[in-house]
Image (cartoon, rainbow, N blue to C red):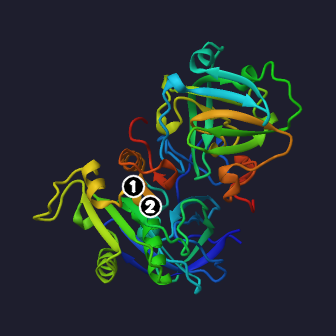
Amino acid sequence: MTIISRGFTGRRRVDDEKLPPGQYVTTDFPVLSAGPTPRVPLAKWEFTVGDGNNELKRWDWKSFRELPTETFTVDIHCVTRWSKFGTTWEGVSLDTLFADVKTDASYALVHSYGGYTTNLPLNDLLNKQAWIAFKFEGEDLAPEHGGPARLLVPHLYLWKSAKWVHGITLMKQDSPGFWERLGYHNYGDPWREQRFWSD
Amino acid sequence: MWHVGKIIALHDETATARTIILEVPDWPGHIAGQHVDVRLTAADGYSAARSYSIASAPNVDGRIELTIERLPDGEVSPYLTQELTVGDPLELRGPLGGWFVWRANQTEAIQLIAGGSGIVPLMAMIRSRASAGNRAPFRLVYSVREPAAVFYRDELKALSSQDSADSVTYAYTRAAPEDWPRPPGRIDAALIESAAWPSNLGPTCYVCGPTPFVETAARLLIASGHSPDKIRTERFGPTGDRK
């Protein structure tokens, strides 16, 4: 049952086909974070891939930045209902980071400086769908947007794109992350409007 | 699942903010700090939804209050603050959010820091504490542009005068009342030092406001010794540093 809001007309856009259901377009860049912004000096920054028992890969900032990078332009969608079109980032593809990682895991738990975590199927991180991004619109990524580096998985709601990313733990069994334990959907596909547990 | 609430009362908090009180027959109850999504639908089916914090304490009578700040170029807030009248139905979804919440069984000291309309979820916590008869020591630092921009002024005054464990410190950014001891300006280390609980008390801190305000407040709390894992934040609006 939909209730018509008497006298409401709203705004229309010509490019609404790029907009997932229940979202609106913003040209700003709002911030959603559960706590203070961690400050991570590049000299101490590390990114690791492990399987819960063993560390499989480790990069410091220098070795990470020696990896081949990609510049890509994507639309991003936050569960708080804003979408931002045509954002340009530079980062390292997860395909590059996982090129010689051998695993039979199906899931990943991404963890961040500051303690944030988020989970997603490993397949959603591979095949040109995800990056560790360190530049936004040509500039170093600001700390409040996840700098020095954040995960970017633009085909899922943005809480999956963990800011201040620190590492990835590969898992055979799925395990919910921070927001996923607090009521947000386990997968978070904006086109199916998977916002909350009940969606 | 969307609930259909009915507007039973509304009143202005300031020249740009209005409180709407809804009766929601199948409301499941909420925790202070949670929000709802509100959806408006035009006659041709076009709809727009936004999130708003709940201002009222948890209660059993199926009533909730929202206080909405009107954004000059907003799509939904001008309708909610100017068009909506008593008796209108309103679709909402919730309660939502499980992190930026204060439960009435929490007993530790609580530091609340609000910037502008960021007071709304914190007011729900203050009201929740009062209605539960909870004795947890609360302090609120409330930063506003000018005296006329304060929400809930009389209620905050009444609550802090009946209960010495419940103190409110105002910080004005543009214009202060006459004889106000602190010149108008952004919150700073001296204000946090004098008005907030000391870090050795180990308070849980809830900070809500525009993104740059929350970034500043959280940074000041950490600089004065508060542990980052005791600071919960809720931000709204752009970062202000780039478009």
Q: Do the residues labelled 2 and 1 touch (CB within 8 Å)?
A: yes
Chain of the residue displaying label 1: B
Three-letter code for the amino acid on which mark 2 is drawn: Pro
On the image, which quarter does residue A127 sit in? top right
Tell me, yes or no, if residue B14 can be seen here.
no
Real-space CA distance between mark 2 and mark 1, rounded to the nearest whole angstrom? 7 Å
* Left or right: where B120 falls relative to A16: left
Percent coordinates x, y for residue B233 in the rendering? 48, 54
- Residue furthest out toward the bottom: B61
- A9 versus A39 height, above or below: below
Percent coordinates x, y for residue A122 in the rendering? 80, 35
On the image, which quarter does residue B62 sit in? bottom right
Camera-side residue: B31 or A86?
A: B31
Mark 2 falls on what kind of element? loop
Could you classify mark 2 by the number of other residues whose Cα lies within 10 Å: few (under 14), some (14-19), or many (20 or more)?
many
- Which residue does the numbered mark 2 point to in the structure image? B203
On the image, which quarter does residue B58 sit in? bottom right
